[in-house]
Amino acid sequence: MEQQIVKVKNKRGVKVIPGFGFSMGVTLFLLSVIVLIPLASIFLSTARLDFREFWEIVTSRQIVSGYIVSLSCSFIAALVNVVFGLMLAWVIVRYEFPGRRLMDGLIELPFALPTAVAGISLTYLYSDQGWIGSFFAKAGIKIAYTRIGITIAMVFVGIPFVVRSLQPVLEKLDRQYEEAALMLGAGRTYTFFRVILPELFPALLAGFGLAFARGIGEYGSVVFIAGNIPYKTQIAPLLIMTKLEQYKYADATACALVLLLISFALMLLINSIQLHMQKFSKC
Amino acid sequence: MVLKTMKKIKENVCLSLLSISLLGGILTGCGNSSESAGKENAAVELLNVSYDPTRELYVSYNELFCKYWNEKTGQDVTVTQSHGGSGSQARSVIEGNEADVVTLALAHDITAIEEAGLIEGGWEDEFEKDSSPYTSTIVFLVRKGNEKNILDWNDLIRDDVAVITPNPKTSGAACWSFLAAWAYQQEQDGQDEPATQEFMKKLYQNVLVLDSGARGSTNTFVENKQGDVLLAWENEAYLSMQEYPDEYEIVAPSISILAQPSVAIVDSNAKSHDTQEAAAAYLEYLYSDDAQRLAGQNFYRPSNETILKEFSDQFDLGMNLVTIEDFGGWNEAYKKFFDDGAIFDQIYEN
């Protein structure tokens, strides 16, 4: 369908943005200056190391533990975000209630708030002396300065991604499907899992991917709430910063490169799942 | 929808035009000031890149120096301060922050700038007392009443004590704390290194939060109320005491370390700004009696012995202080303790 539309438009010569050559040029230029060249410089400064050195640095136990902390916490955070993000988006799109617009705006706050501010206030709240943390402390659960705290900070920064990728899809979702399913005798659970969820799945996956990637790279808010203890609560971006502070530029970029490759591979995987699902649903 | 995006694009274009013109304004502004800097009696600008806890000290010192310089030469001087973790401040200078002078937490950070070619060799001897106009040391800050009875380094390895200190890899204060603890235990163990390493391991197992800088650790201890004892710069400890007089106490351990924050002119920047004279005077004047007293009032130990004695009721002058020379100098010490895979990393293995 989509491809046909593009073709028709091309035949008629109708183009929204004039001048393919010009706009492509601008796009490539901006992409190079802002994304590609900085990324290439990471490759370049890593190239100062020979492969053995590189391998030793990126497989040192501390670095690997940093990757594991970052990946596992952001994975869990992204999962949590998928569940709560879906609920949030659903509530905002489907129900009318006072303060709905306000709530809609609040969701973007994590984008706008400096991450350090978020980190400091989350730590203040979730430490065992804080408002929320003290309740959990009574139950013997420590939140700030543990991996739970790291995950919470990542949930905070990741939630807008899931909500914002779900919202437009939810808005377009035809309610007749649900009504039909209910009238044909499907229960609520069945309707949700077999009728609604498949429609939402690509958007959910995209939101998951974005939140996950954001969590992996998150530094500002996490360093405050993580205890930063080696092998326990040190995230990979902090280790990279530490390398920089020690004037070890090549080491830092080597670690960054690996983080980048991991994120890229994950994104690729998520995208290909999405693509596969789209093809599958068309057939 | 399209209209909306068009509007957005227009806004964006306006914004970028605005920022470009602003940038231009800043650039021409810079041009003017560097032109006029060469002329007689024109105002001179200095950028002092320093570390976290000196903020208050340099606010008052700059005032003092401006007055002094104006009386001496008739020239107005404005000093801009920049503060942050010592290591990252040094890095910013290496990467192009145009500091005329640096006043950092440890000589190691200034050596890094020297190695980048911005400071000429021999800067340690350019000013008196190894270019350290004021010194400090590491003390314990504990909660009022000192319920856990923390008196010396060996109390820090008890199971019921939680310690707050920053990470030595990123914080100058943490390096000094680590070395002070090491010096204490070396004396206890009769220089037996493996035993001392075991002690350090126990100590760092009690560390609850390893922040990246001294101010971060102070926040963790003071604002978030974590831990029983903060290993702190003496001056930071006094500042916290001043702010919350009823909540904390300072405990001076039996052995600590003479922390010598170093100062240096960033030669290549001062040359290109033509501020060498003012920059040298700025650091030289730190040794004057007035400035030394100011340092004392800001809880730094004046390097001038006579003036230090004036503050004998403020500082515990009886503390046994080792120096970095006992560790063979900073380069030696850094390699042995804090480099990747060195002793600090080893105590966290397994």
Image: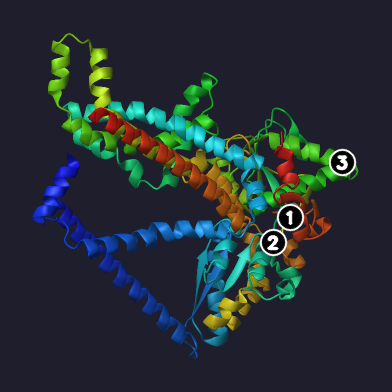
| Circle 3 residue | B188
| Circle 2 residue | B108
- Residue B313 in percent (x, y) is at 72, 54
Badge 3 element: helix
- Residue A60 in percent (x, y) is at 66, 43
Badge 1 element: helix
At a point 41% along the width and 40% down the height, the residue shown is A267
Give the residue type at disc 2: His
Q: Residue furthest top?
A: A185
Q: How many marks?
A: 3
- Residue B47 in percent (x, y) is at 52, 71
Q: Identify the image quadrant of residue B279.
A: bottom right
Q: Residues within 10 Å of mark 1 (few under 14, many from 20)?
A: some
Give the residue type at disc 3: Gln
Q: Which mark is residue B334?
A: 1
Labels 1 and 2 positioned on one and the same chain: yes
